[in-house]
Image (tube, coloured by chain):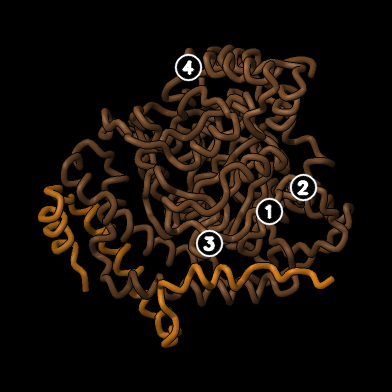
Amino acid sequence: MLKKETISDLANELHGLPLEEPRAAALADHVVRLNSLVRASASQLARGDEPAQFARMLALQKRPRASS
Amino acid sequence: MTGDITSSGLCELADAIKQRRISSYQAVTACLDRIDAWQPRINAFVAISREEALASARHADRSLAEGRILGALHGVPLAHKDMFSRAGRASSCGTRTFSGEIASETATVLQRLDTAGAIEIGTLNMTELAGFDTPGEEPLGACHNPWNTQKFNPGSSYGPASALAARLTFGSLGSCTGGSIRIPAAACGVVGLKPTSGRVSRHGALTRSWSLDTIGPMARTARDVARMLGCISGFDARDPTSSDEAVPDYEAGLSIRLVGIRVAVQRRFWSTVDDHVADALASLQEALAREGAAIEPKDLPDGHLLWDLASVLSDCETATVFGHHLRQHGAEITQPNRDQLQRGNFIPATRYLEALALRGRYLREFCEQVFADADVLVTPALPVSPPTIDEMRDRRFAEDFNRSRVVNIYTRPFNYLGLPALTVPCGFTPDGMPVACQLVGRPFDEVTLLAVAHAYQGVTDWHLRLPPIH
């Protein structure tokens, strides 16, 4: 579990910008929620689902041309 | 052309200049006069290039007199969000922390508009680093909505939207990571297009999130947006993420008739929607049906999941892009944006890559579910009327408002999916604020969105209304 104290320390270390407690807590809630949501969705990933394929998928999903 | 030049549309003006019914000098002068009247009230401009614009207009008029037409936007005054590089100039990107960084080359989109003959009359206000502005803490001062200067003006391209609504420019370029073209366009009653990912080069534009950022045109009519899109689209060797898909003739595509066009509408909205927005959407659907379109209610995939996945990409990429800047200038960046720029540091790389890998799968599923038997999807653009600035100054109210996602729940999912999406005005609230809908299409099918919007604007007059100056 990501703790607000950890976030505050890391923020200070990365940018020299310490986070006040309520902001660190809000940030912790935000990233914990996103991390668990992606982890749950990732169970649907198949072997061939790779980040670099998105541009190709866009081209594949183009509107089919009307047959003449 | 009769009456006030600034009341005409971009294409109408371009055609009038080409036919020498009006000079470019007259058009630029009319814009500058109007900017003088409106700028103190709405603060849409960051800088006004008065002398340069007038000199360019004289050059455009001389060229025309000598029989040379520079391009489809010959002599037309434009102004853009202040985040596109121009050689020899510094762009603010909505912050004071970039001051003095002079660009050594010009953004591809500006080059292409220059080639088309457009005249840049100034640069337009935007939120800090294209993020979120807290009312009262805008680094370049607040940019107000000309329809009501007491209302909160959402979306990072608020300068272009406000300038277009007040008729200070004939067209603008905006940028969009989660709705920043469509949201301010909707709030200000103008047309805004987020093209398909890769359709428009991003070389020379501020990067915020390379997976989601898109540059797009904003104007008062779909026809005007179509002309601008035709000028800026297409592969660019300087942007390897740009697409080599052929660029169609978007203006020619406007003549498509709506008979046979299948329009999907949401059976269940993704958020609360104000009654007057729902009523305006219903009226729009009726208007499209009268023109021959078939309206088909549909269940959509979960917009909130797509919104969250976009957040993962945006958080991680902005933390990467601005990490160095944050270390150098963190104390000068406003607190909400500083928080936003730090979030991605705490998301593991595996989660980021999973969110990226899911993108193609969810795009395919969305297209199969929505576009298998539909050409266009209609959704709300901004589902509620913007709150007042005073309300947004209350920290708790602002946090609740932002947490509710109502500002970008209908726009951000389509940045994640990379689909083209366009907002078009479709009514007004009882207190006189514009209402808009969003049209979404298959990848690279901007032409259908523009044709539907053009047909709708042909039978309505929302886009012709002018905000009063008090």
Instruction: Measure how far apart labels 2 and 4 are at the Cα level.
Output: 33 Å
- Residue B382: x percent and y percent? 59, 48
- Circle 4 crowding by C-alpha within 10 Å: few under 14, some 14–19, many from 20: some
**Colour given to chain A in the rendered image:** orange
Tag 4 secondary structure: helix
Instruction: Measure how far apart labels 1 and 2 are at the Cα level.
Output: 9 Å
**Front one among B39 and B148:** B39
Horizontal placement of B289 versus B405: left or right?
A: right
Numbered circle sitting on residue A49: none
**Colour given to chain B in the rendered image:** brown
The answer to whether dots 4 and 3 both sit on one chain is: yes
Task: Please state which amino acid type lies under the numbered disc 3.
Answer: Gly
**Front one among B21 and A58:** B21
Residue for badge 1? B248
Instruction: Measure how far apart labels 4 and 3 are at the Cα level.
Output: 37 Å
Tag 2 secondary structure: helix
- Residue B33: x percent and y percent? 58, 12
